[in-house]
Amino acid sequence: MPRKRRHPIVNTVLADALREAGWSMTAAAKAVNEVGRQSGLPLSHGATAVAHWLTGTVPRPDTIQAAAEAFTRRLGRPVSATDLGWPSAGLDRVDPWQGDPVAVLAALGEDDMLNRRTALTTGLYSLAALAVPASHPPPGTRQGGSQRAGAGDVDRIREMTRRMSDADDLYGGGHARAAVAAYLTRDVAPLLRGSTGRTRPALFTAAAELAYLAGWMAADAGAAGLAQRYYVQAVRLGEEAGDPLVRSTALRSMAVQAVELGHAAEGLALADAAASGLRQRCPLRTRAWVTGMQAEANAAVGNHRQALALLRVAEQELERADSLPESAWTGNYRRESFEHQTGLTLTALADLPAAEEHLALSANSRRTIERRSRALIGVRLAHLQARRGHTETSAQTVLGLREDLAAVSSARVAGHLRVLRAAWQPCRANPVVGGADRLAAGLLR
């Protein structure tokens, strides 16, 4: 006869949801923690916490959001706070594909600029938001701002985006994000409201490019939910501009993020959507950039032959490209970028020796300004070397990145360093490994 519970279940709605999900209390806590991890929330709940929730304890708002997302993923349907027996208190998720993208973008920038708790103000990373609607309702009439845009405004936005992108390359997404958000919110969004005339499409394209940069920086800084919402608005602004290239660019970045977070099937769908949106007159260099992401996403889902075939296509497109690499990211796919993509694809296909070769080629050929890329690819290379059992080589790789690592603020780089420290733990008596471990420990403080 089962022992009588000391504390009776009060939250029967949550108990029913656990049964429907087929989760034990331990499994539920693990799923909630994983959702938090993907959005930069340091959650560490266990079975005891879930037991407390069942007996009437209401968790913190960030945990409520993470739990709702975890059950949504598990059950394959939207689950809200109230569906789990908790008060919503305004925490129910908002579809980023709805509403006026200009207003949404301005609100995102305001939250980002003020460094609010973005998991609460913009929501966690959502799998549901990865489903791109076939069409969006028109945003309706916007309240016109006091400013009117012209060609000079477009040029200024693009020049500022280039300069901010250079800073991101040098110092990582964790540096100067507030400045990007402030420029987007205070200078760019007012120009979009009520914009008319021949300049309007170019203005919305320029704003989409800046929104993309804000999303890229947020993703690099570990704010996955915020990044996702920036990317969605970049897609929507690109659609409003009638610019399929910037739309595909943003979808490609959503695919990158999905694959990095372990959602391979969704990443493949996004990469395919990015490719299908490109017109035939799209520059070959840009097409190669998107095709390379399709290869990586196919590798992530285990499509071995398709991944290798797409890699060959991307290489051919890159070799045939007749345009010089440009400063804008859509035209900046270089050989070293392709080597990085190849290394990631081969890693997913478990061809680790070849992957190491390509990652090394990419890291060693980066330009001076590409400090964050050099640091990120370098620690990915070191991680791969550690996986292959080449611990001292892995440590030497990290020691060779000392100056880059010290200058870069990147949650993605930091995540690889944490994994490396765990891999090095049995070998820290080795002087090289010990030195690299002390370097990493200092950087992670």
Image (cartoon, rainbow, N blue to C red):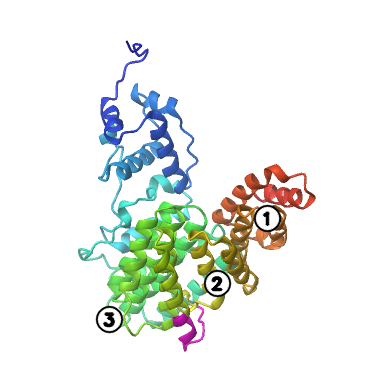
Residue 240 % position (x, y): 28, 71
Res. 279 visible in picture: yes
The magenta stretch spans which residues? 316-327
Which residue matches tag 2? 339
Task: Say if mark 3 contacts mark 2, CB within 8 Å.
Answer: no
Q: Nearer the viewer, residue 119 or 401?
A: 401
| In-image side of 364 versus 90 (left or right) | right
Residue sitting nearer the eye, 119 or 325:
325
Residue drawn at (31%, 31%), measured in percent from left and top?
18
At which x and y percent is residue 419?
A: 59, 48
Q: Is residue 324 magenta?
A: yes
> In the drawing, what numbered circle is on residue 390?
1
**Residue shown at the point (74%, 50%) measured from the top left:** 433
Is 289 magenta? The answer is no
Disc with the residue nearer the chain's start (1 vs 2): 2
Identify the image quadrant of the N terminus.
Answer: top left
Identity, as a three-letter code, of the amino acid under mark 3: Gly
Say what secondary structure mark 3 lies in.
loop
Q: Is residue 237 left or right of residue 111?
A: left
Where residue 233 is drawn, which disc sits there? none
Q: Residue at x 32, y 68 (%)?
A: 273
**Residue 106 in view of the camera:** no
Q: Nearer the viewer, residue 314 or 107?
A: 314
Q: Measure how far apart labels 1 and 2 are at the Cα level.
A: 21 Å
